[in-house]
Amino acid sequence: MPHAALQRLRAQATRQAMTRALALLDRLPLSIALILGLGLGLSPFVPEPHLWEKLKMLAAGTLSRPIDILDLFYHAIPMTLLLAKLARMAWVARVR
């Protein structure tokens, strides 16, 4: 298969995947994104939010244990989902 045809197929597959991901994000209720983002993203709340603690460890260079790295991702994913939902809502409102 020629290189140009392969590039077109990859670009088409990427567009389809992005369209599906954005459709899924559009169907996600904001209330669920808020509960996940604020609940899982910031828990436990005492003595400080866990995500904040892990980000401080990352900035200090002490985030080295695999469990801490996984914990950072576990707490960052719901917050990233919430931010993506809010950004998508703002973009859709601006386009309309």
Image (cartoon, helix red, strand yellow):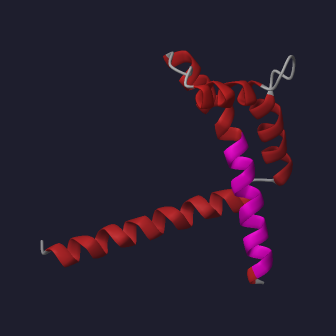
Residue 17 sits above or below residue 81 on the image? below
User: Which residue is rendered at x = 30% and y = 71% of the image?
Assistant: 9
Residue located farthest toward the left when viewing the structure as drawn: 1
Residue 95, x across and y down, in percent: 74, 82
Q: Which residues are magenta?
A: 79-94
Give the left or right position of residue 16, taking residue 7 as reference.
right
Which residue is most to the bottom?
96
The residue sitting at the front extreme is 60
Placement of the N terminus among the 4 image quadrants: bottom left
Q: Position of residue 27 (x, y in %)?
A: 72, 59
The residue drawn where x is 73% and y is 62% is 87
Up-down relation of residue 33 to residue 59 (above or below)? below
Residue drawn where x is 83% and y is 45% of the image: 34
Q: Nearer the viewer, residue 62 or 49?
A: 62
Residue 20: x %, y % from top left: 55, 62
Compared across the picture, whether 23 is left or right of 41 comes to: left
Q: Main secondary structure of the magenta part?
A: helix
- Say left or right for 7 vs 21: left
Q: Quadrant of the C terminus?
A: bottom right
The percent coordinates of residue 15 (x first, y second) are: 46, 70
Asked if the magenta segment contains residue 80, the reply would be: yes
- Is residue 87 a member of the stretch shown in magenta? yes
Asked which quadrant contains residue 22, the reply is: bottom right
Viewer-side residue, 84 vs 59? 59
| 91 lies above or below 54 | below
